[in-house]
Image: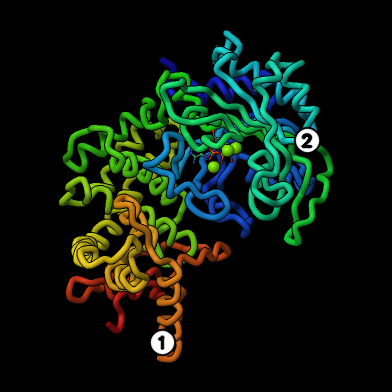
Amino acid sequence: MRSSADIREAFLSFFESKGHTRVASSSLIPANDPTLLFTNAGMNQFKDCFLGLDKRAYTRAVSSQKCVRAGGKHNDLENVGYTARHHTFFEMLGNFSFGDYFKHDAIAYAWEFLTSPAWLNIPSDKLWVTVYATDDEAFQLWQDVAGVPAERIIRIGDNKGAPYASDNFWAMGDTGPCGPCTEIFYDHGADIWGGLPGSAEEDGDRYIEIWNNVFMQFNRTADGVLHPLPAPSVDTGMGLERISAVMQHVHSNYEIDLFQHLLQAAADAIGCSNEQQASLKVVADHARSCSFLVADGVVPSNEGRGYVLRRIIRRACRHGNKLGATQPFFYKMVAALAQVMGAAYPELVERQTFIEKVLKQEEEQFARTLEQGLKILEQDLVNLQGTVISGDVVFKLYDTYGFPMDLTADIARERNLSIDEAGFNACMDAQRERSQKAGKFNFDYNSLLKVDVDTVFTGYDSTHSEGKVVAMFIGDEAVNHVNEGQ
Ligand code: ATP
Ligand code: MG
Ligand code: MG
Ligand code: MG
């Protein structure tokens, strides 16, 4: 079996052998890019190279990039625990050309790495590819360079109702570098539900997208206009966990070596059995995103990046509670994670104690209201008419018990219920108005992502009243007054 660490190294050395410079992963907090919540792809740190604003000593690069997709344009938070292939945190393997090679070499390299006996040696009849609907050149190259038969190449058009909105037109965000792409899928077998890309059953998990090769050609500005880049470039991304699943002959990412270790650690920390329970997967997944985010300097707060982190931690705590956790458990995942990923990401080891402290503090704080909030919700559900939890209830859980809206939505989904989001937002607006009139704190409680504001951790100081959080201070500034004035 090839370990994920081994596959990461194979990818990096393959592209080094093709003249690429190995570049370290950048932080999960994008440098100087207010358009981006978290680093969501390998190309982020090279954005200015594509735009021609930054010239480096190299025109070819390869990296394994830490990514978080839990908000913003690419958000997979709701998928975790439900699909075999999505994480909030994952590693993206990528090769890049800044005005150097283009479609021909990108396709040739990708195919060689995947199918050559010297590298991954994946049987080519398990692979399918897609191209952007009008990209005849890529369609032809797959046949000529890789020998993929035409019937295994699928054209994907603008299926999302707007020009260049297709799955095969990749964009990092609403603005920035973008272009048509070609994606490689692996067929996990007929016993798994799911159809080919572009089919009605494409949301299934039989054909899993493993690698996206983007032909960077444009810069999209805020007015929606596509401006040609100074030079056609290449940006690719392959999920390390997905390719590991292929190489380890398992279907789900959660069955790979690394996740087996984390699932066991989660079961041990919670004190439950290690069966394939969805909640354990959520805990294992969230432990990675939360630990890496704290390692990169994000701390829980009520706005921006810190609020996304808080939401993920609280979600993990709720899943632990569901599995019977009675003590803080989440912070214990940090040691297990440092054990399996510390060699590749030393910051996990260096900052382990700090990460544990931050997670434990958030966990303890939320534990005070979690049980009570769940009880209140159960009572409300007894009287529920229909399948929608009212905005008032969602708001009460949020305001009094610190339940982020998506946490209540997560509970609702498990029971085939949904929440009244508009009703919740109306309650939020009303509260905002009240507090403005009263001239009190004027924070935006909703999950407003003010990504231009960085949350700086300078220590916690919390005061509590009747077991409910009244205020938490980061530095000198009160950023949380859950239950204040109630
Ligand atoms: P999907 O359609 O499966 O959601 P995507 O098209 O959104 O994937 P890309 O933006 O093309 O993904 O990212 C490049 C690669 O990164 C994907 O081909 C996949 O291997 C990997 N990847 C993307 N999102 C995730 C995720 N949430 N968890 C793990 N790997 C991911
Ligand atoms: Mg996606
Ligand atoms: Mg996709
Ligand atoms: Mg893709």
Which numbered mark, 2 or 1, is in the foreground of this view? 2
Q: Is residue 357 left or right of residue 22?
A: left
**In what element is the residue under mark 2?**
loop
Image location of residue 454, percent across then percent down: 52, 62
Q: Nearer the viewer, residue 331 or 368?
A: 368
Q: Residue at 45% x, 45% y: name it.
A: 88
Q: Residue at 21% x, 45% y: name it.
A: 323
Q: Nearer the viewer, residue 86 or 55?
A: 86
Q: Which corner quadrant of the figure contains ligand 2?
A: top right
Would residue 241 be visible to someone looking at this image?
Answer: no
Image location of residue 58, percent across then percent down: 74, 33
Q: Is residue 407 above or below residue 102?
A: below
Q: Residue at 75% x, 43% y: name it.
A: 50
Q: Find out if the beta carbon at label 1 lies less than 8 Å from the nearest ligand 1 atom.
A: no
Q: Nearer the viewer, residue 484 or 429?
A: 429
Look at the image and tell me in which quarter the N terminus lies: top left
Q: CA distance from mark 2 to mark 1?
A: 54 Å
Instruction: Give the label on residue 434, or none.
Output: 1
Would residue 230 be visible to someone looking at this image?
Answer: yes
- Indicate the amino acid at tag 2: Thr
Tell whether label 1 touches label 2 (CB within 8 Å): no
Occupied quadrant, residue 301: bottom left
Furthest-top residue in this view = 117
The residue indicated by pointer 2 is: 134
Occupied quadrant, residue 405: bottom left
* Crowd class of label 1 (few under 14; some 14 to 19; many from 20; radius 10 Å): few
Specify how the rendered protein is coloured: rainbow
Q: Is residue 218 left or right of residue 311?
A: right
- Mark 2 or 1, nearer chain start: 2
